[in-house]
Amino acid sequence: MGLILDSSVLVATERKERTVYAVLAEIGGSQKDIEVGISAITVAELAHGAARAETPQRKEKRLRFIREIASAVPIYPITAAIAFRAGLIDGETQAKGVRVALSDLLIGVTALELGFGIGTGNLRDFGRIPGLSVIQL
């Protein structure tokens, strides 16, 4: 089994001044033999947050955190298969009046394509993606 971490989990980790390794240890302790990774979209979201930091010191701290994540877990790219599936799901859900932010949809579909669940603090939005196993972290 695998788990894609959403940026909400990582942002909360960074704000609490915890390390990525502490969170990974917690996940590993509660879920045996679980593969943990992130989507390339999550990297973009975290980089956006670093660029918007209120001080140069905060920016550097966030950039270090992103580098720590990148060295600790695999980063999964957005492939043509992910983009295609996301487009289908987006069209189907919007036809029913349900909207999911494109970034969340791409992160969620990355998990679906890998046969993984999503670890998030954003249950509402990820819960709108059909077939996605959502785990609150």
Image (cartoon, rainbow, N blue to C red):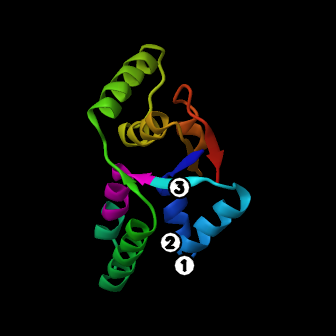
**Separation of residues labelled 1 and 2 (CA atoms):** 5 Å
Give the percent coordinates (x, y) of residue 36. 53, 55
Neighbour tally class for label 3: few under 14, some 14-19, many 20 plus, Cα within 10 Å:
many
Dot 1 or dot 3: first in sequence order is: 1
Residue at the spot of label 2 = 14
Give the percent coordinates (x, y) of residue 100. 44, 33
Q: Judge by depth and name the residue closer to the eye, 44 or 74.
A: 74
Give the percent coordinates (x, y) of residue 23. 60, 67
Q: Is residue 107 left or right of residue 134?
A: left
What kind of residue is marked 1?
Answer: Glu
Q: Is residue 123 left or right of residue 129?
A: right
Give the extent of the magenta segment.
Answer: 38-47
Q: Is residue 34 left or right of residue 47?
A: right
Dot 2 or dot 3: first in sequence order is: 2
Residue at the spot of label 3 = 36
Residue at the spot of label 1 = 17
Q: Going 48% across and 34% down the picture, which residue do you hit?
A: 112
Q: Quadrant of residue 63?
A: bottom left
Q: Mark 3: which secondary structure?
A: strand
What kind of residue is marked 2?
Answer: Glu
Q: Mark 1: which secondary structure?
A: loop
Cβ–Cβ under 8 Å for marks 1 and 2:
yes
